[in-house]
Amino acid sequence: MSDIDVRFGGIRALSGVSLDVRPRTVQGVIGPNGAGKTTLFNVACGFIQPQEGSLSWKGERLARLRPHQLAGLGISRTLQGLGLFENITVLENVMVGLDRHARSGFFAGLLGVGRSSREELALRERAMSILEELGIDAHADRLPPSLPYAICKRVALARAVAVEPELLLLDEPASGLSNAEMDELGDLIRALSDRMAVMLVEHHMDLVMAVCDEIVVLDFGRRIARGTPAEVQNDPAVVAAYLGETVGDEGTAASSPEDGE
Ligand SMILES: Nc1ncnc2c1ncn2[C@@H]1O[C@H](COP(=O)(O)OP(=O)(O)OP(=O)(O)O)[C@@H](O)[C@H]1O
């Protein structure tokens, strides 16, 4: 993302924000409430079209990113709402995700045109192997409403990961999880980053600090810092933003918007 501007009426939700996610790294996006994290995530998913700035994918500029294009590009996402189908099993939820990608062309070469029982079996095996990898295969035949929230979150993650995206976009994956569950999620995200890039938008500082290779910090819609976890943690602009103080205009630090909150 390069120089992204998003305005909602008089509110500048993002001002000139740039961000790169490099292959097989975890890129974190943090910031206090209202900093613009969700807006940035929505730009990356094609839900929001920025007024200014551009998006590129693997060196090519994307004219206008739409949500339905993500699958074809090799990008998957999880959202804050889980979006699971409640009346089909966990395994079937993951299969549906795979099947959508198959029909969008991402897996078409692998699965062929039309669905034979052999292809159905391939989908099932693929879905099962990802449930095993995420440690939730024991719940394959359960319906989502009968399962704890943490397991459902992992099912949503399994669905996004099953298609083996090159970029995985995670919006607040740790919300509602216990500390132990968050640690497990951290290990999982690190393991996934061996084979895909991850953009992690997250409130929980412990998780972000533990798993990210690089972090971008937003405040009032501006990027106020960027660096390794150790670098951003010690950045005075970041400390000030999190303490709710006005951020000074020194170095990369941004000033508060003229129109207040
Ligand atoms: N659809 C919208 N219409 C109007 N203003 C919006 C809209 N979405 C976001 N905003 C405003 O844009 C700014 C950035 O919001 P955003 O939700 O991206 O921040 P955030 O960092 O995700 O916050 P939080 O941590 O509270 O979720 C806020 O001032 C918010 O009120």
Image (cartoon, helix red, strand yellow):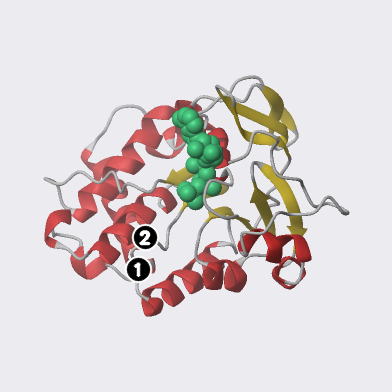
Measure how far apart labels 1 and 2 are at the Cα level.
21 Å
Q: Residue at x 32, y 46 (%)?
A: 81
SS at badge 1: loop
Q: Quadrant of residue 238?
A: bottom right
Say few, some or many: other residues with alpha carbon within 10 Å of mark 1 (under 14 / 14 to 19 / 20 or more): some
Q: Is the C-beta of the residue carrying label 1 under 8 Å from the nearest atom of ligand 1?
A: no
Say few, some or many: other residues with alpha carbon within 10 Å of mark 2 (under 14 / 14 to 19 / 20 or more): many
Q: Residue at x 83, y 51 (%)?
A: 252
Sequence order check: which comes first, mark 1 or mark 2?
Answer: 2
- Residue 177's label in the rendered image is 1
- Rendered location of residue 257, percent (x, y): 69, 38
Instruction: Name the residue carrying label 2.
Output: 130
Q: Residue at x 57, y 24 (%)?
A: 49
Q: Is 222 in front, or is 85?
A: 222
Judge whether 96 appears above or below 94 on screen: above
Say which amino acid is labelled 2. Answer: Ile
Does residue 257 show up?
yes
Say which amino acid is labelled 1. Answer: Leu
Q: Is the C-beta of the residue carrying label 2 under 8 Å from the nearest atom of ligand 1?
A: no
